[in-house]
Amino acid sequence: MKKTITFFSAPKPFTNPHIAMIQRNAIKSWTLLKDVEVILLGNETGLAEVAQEFGVKHFPNVKVNESGVPLISSMFEIVRDNSNSELLCIINADMILMDDFVEAAMECNSLLSQKQKRASALQKKFVLLSQRWDYDITSPIDFANGWELKLRKNVEEQNQLHRPAGSDFFLFPKKCYQDIPDFTIGRAGWDNWMIYKARKENWAVIDCTPSMMIVHQNHDYSHLPNGKPHYEHPETNVNIQLAGGQANIRYTILDSSHQLRDGKLARPKMTYARFMRGVELFLRKIFFFLPENMIENIARPKRWKKRIQKIVNRK
């Protein structure tokens, strides 16, 4: 049976108890959404059993890098070949979704279809993204009736809206992103490139933060080599090279072209962060011959001060 949205993800091994718990929470929440299917990719320990338990598709034969980490290009290829959904959504396996996610996706799809004839810039090529809400969790979610209301209340009480960097999902029409480089999943850079690619191709990049709550279950990095964050691993440097350099992996939600607010597509509200991001892009265009970090130091003074402080602290 044809589904409207296909979610796909490459979870981590289910060996760490906390990682296993939050991934089971996330996958279960996806299966509860209306008119969707779920595809899990990879050959990690415990994944086949979880896929069978939740009744979702599982494809273990994903191409991997030298360290055995799945390649995003292979993930996209497998999902295109095994999904008949109009919309695809790559998502991290620690993200809990609720009904407002599908509602927002359907609203955007409908609104873009209506506006397509009137505005050439709003073609039926787009990508949806959103800031996440970070949430400390220590026990499995009880998905009984009313679980969404309870979770929303708990998340709001912790009040940890993540800054507009580091995207945890991308929802897009199946015809988009046909030429994905061999990025390594779970390392930095590829998600920023997804936004860069959409802006370069003049697709609508829609920030749905005002219209949905996506919940990131906080965790450490013990599942990664030496327990280092994803941006400190060699595969991140490879991702940056594949993306075309540092300038192409600086794109964040601040670079969205639209926002979904109150059932309407609108231009993002101007904030100091968005204004400075515009200044940065303008300076990069004018002073393209200058080193990338020089422009960043001008446009992002707060970040530069933090880097200096880290250096001082190390000494």
Image: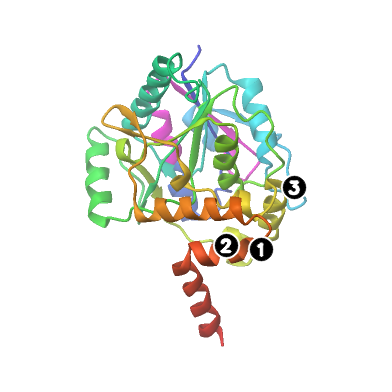
Q: Position of residue 184 (x, y in %)?
A: 67, 47
Q: CA distance from mark 1 to mark 2?
A: 7 Å
Q: Residue at horizontal 25%, vertical 44%?
A: 152
- N-term-proximal mark, 1 vs 3: 3
Residue linked to disc 2: 295
Residues rendered magenta in the picture:
26-47
- N-term-proximal mark, 3 vs 2: 3
Q: Residue at horizontal 56%, vertical 45%?
A: 191
Say above or below: 93 vs 224.
above
Residue linked to disc 1: 291
Q: CA distance from mark 1 to mark 3?
A: 31 Å
Residue 227 placement: quadrant:
bottom right
Mark 2: which amino acid?
Answer: Ile
Of badges 1 and 3, the one in the foreground is 1
Residue linked to disc 3: 65
Say above or below: 298 vs 50.
below
Residue 71 placement: quadrant:
top right
Q: Residue at horizontal 28%, vertical 50%?
A: 155
